Amino acid sequence: IDDDEHNATEDGSLPPLLPESSASSISHGEVADFFDMVADCTTWLNESGADFGPLGFSVLSGGIARGPGDERSPFFLEDPGVKKTTGQAENVARSLSLTSWRTILRR
């Protein structure tokens, strides 16, 4: 760990922003389109198994991603910070239950 970066967050402040990359940037409209698509894809609720987890969205790649096979949530939304720093998939929608997801889809 770089001492300057490490010391910058010891005071409780947020770490510096990640550098912007136009190659992986997505627009607000693309994110909205994705969630519109999700609302139409109720079959996703039945598409998980031991070898693969629920479908979802990767903020870093700007595309569809699958969560880990042991994921309980019916939807996967990749935590970009965890993915960028550790390479591991972490679901920020992990507290979403099947019942609440069905309620959202019905609205």
Image (cartoon, grey):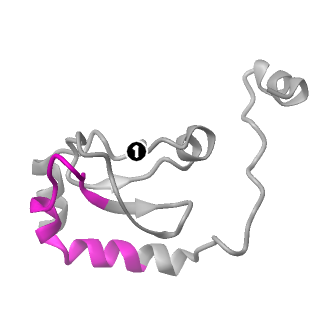
Q: Which residue is at 54% across, 40% downward?
A: 82
Q: Quadrant of residue 6?
A: top right
Please indicate whether residue 91 sits to the left or right of residue 70 in the image: right
Whether residue 66 is situated above or below residue 92 in the rendered picture: below
**Amino acid type, label 1:** Val
| Residue 26 position in % (x across, y down) | 58, 74
Residue 71 pos. (x, y %): 25, 42
- Report helix, strand or loop for mark 1: loop
Residue 18: where, in percent of width, then height? 73, 51
Which quadrant would the N terminus be assigned to in this image? top right
Foreground of the two, 2 or 91: 2
Furthest residue to the top? 10
Q: Residue at x 19, y 74 (%)?
A: 41
Query: Which residue does the numbered mark 1 point to in the structure image?
Result: 92
Residue 52 drawn in magenta: yes
Q: Which residues are magenta?
A: 33-55
Horizontally, residue 87 falls left or right of residue 35, namely right
- Within-10-Å neighbours for mark 1: few <14, some 14–19, many 20+: some
Specify whether 49 is left or right of 55. left
Q: Nearer the viewer, residue 58 or 86?
A: 86
Q: Relative to 35, say whether 47 is above or below.
A: above
Which of these two is toward me, 73 or 53?
53
Residue nearer the viewer, 84 or 102? 84
